[in-house]
Image (cartoon, helix red, strand yellow):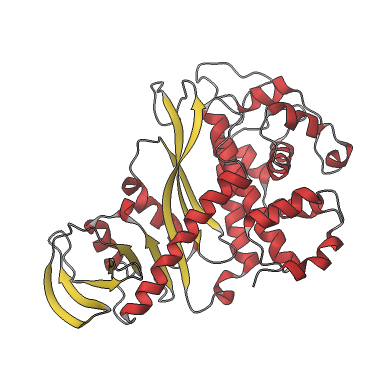
Amino acid sequence: MQINTRLVRPLRRVNVEQIADKYNADAHCKKMTTRTHLKLLTVSFLKGDTHLSQIVNLSKNPKIQRLGIVEISKSQLSKLHHSDKPDRPPTTSKPKSYLVFQEIYEEMVRYALQSLNIHSKRNNRLLIAIDGSKKKAGISNPLFDDIKTVIEMDGIKLHLSVICGVRKLPLVALTTEPTVHDNTQFREIVNKLNDLVDLTNDDVILLFDLGYYDFKQFEELMENGIAFISRAKKNAKFEVIETVSEDPSGIDQIVKIKDCKYPIRLVTLKGEDGKNWRYFTDIFHLKPEEIGKIYPWRWDIEICNREENQSLKMNRFFGKSLNAVLIEIYVILIAQILVILFAEHMGLDYTLTHMINFIRGFFYTDTRYFDYAPRWKNK
């Protein structure tokens, strides 16, 4: 089986047609159904295509057409992505809403969690990092579905949660205007995460930076029994209730914050650079040095963002409408999940960047080629 065929196989696990019917996405399509559309975009992003002309040429490739992809023109593809006006009557070139691809992505996440069997494979703890990053995009006069006025913007903000570790599986992904603060999306991210993973499990820990710094939200997490570790601001005001331990390497304290009705733990550790690093957490049973070792895993989501930008070109969109850019974002995330599933199937612990480089170099090669790959396996 060729690598490109093996990559898209997990898409069969999602009922794309049912999702498309929900949004009436295929009602006016003659040949480019949602499943075909999804396969074409996914394959094009995995190959590194960033222009409509490259995607159109790819659709003409007989090897790609074996995947059920049909040839499409540049104008047809552009119309499928262009944001539609609410008062425009239905036509044969009616665009597909990004909501279709968002829901397909969410179903792919559920399938990946089951397929990877994260809960049985995790090493002691399941660490989930949350962060927001701005994606540059030249969007002209976009129209949000929940906003009735046309707005100008120069990009999209992606609020993402990722499982820390080798795979860095993306979980909840929300998109907003670039000016929206991370903090406003935190509650929705946590609620959606709870539908995927039992956050009240003692082994699950949320990691987030100062963008989600809010004592009321800390209070909600503690009320719901959700473990978290967050950096503390330098100017944080609190009252020390108890100093559990104090030595040259750090201080472990229980403190009371004005806007939080529950006592919270403040761990202060001296880093190798001589600076003091302070963390707020509701985890009381771990040693301070363990807290200091767990929090740096949050950096995995920064690595994930960088790999998405560099390897899957999430910072170079060919679409100019909001709908087109959002479609690309969710398809890129789907492509990322497909790469993770492929790496798991082949038993490789490569980074996302290394996997994509191998895939692009041997896209039409038989998967048996990877029988020789373990000699390059990451230690």
Q: Quadrant of residue 176?
A: top left
* Residue 263 pos. (x, y %): 18, 71
Q: Is residue 279 above or below residue 182?
A: below
The residue lying at 28 percent from left, 55 percent from top is 213
Relative depth, front residue between 38 and 252? 252
342 left or right, relative to 2: left
Q: How many marks?
A: 0
As displayed, is residue 278 above or below residue 109? below
Residue 299 position in % (x across, y down): 45, 60
- From the viewer's perspective, tell me whether residue 15 is left or right of residue 268: right
Q: Is residue 103 visible?
A: no
Front-lying residue, 176 or 108: 176
| Residue 289 percent coordinates (x, y) | 35, 78
User: For residue 122, which quarter of the picture?
Assistant: bottom right
Q: Which quadrant holds the N terminus?
A: bottom right
Residue at point 59% right, 75% down? 121
Kindly tell me whether residue 347 is visible in this rendering: yes
Image position of 217 (left or right of 137): left
Residue 54 in the image: state x and y as whole percent.
Answer: 74, 31
* Quarter assignment of residue 103: top right
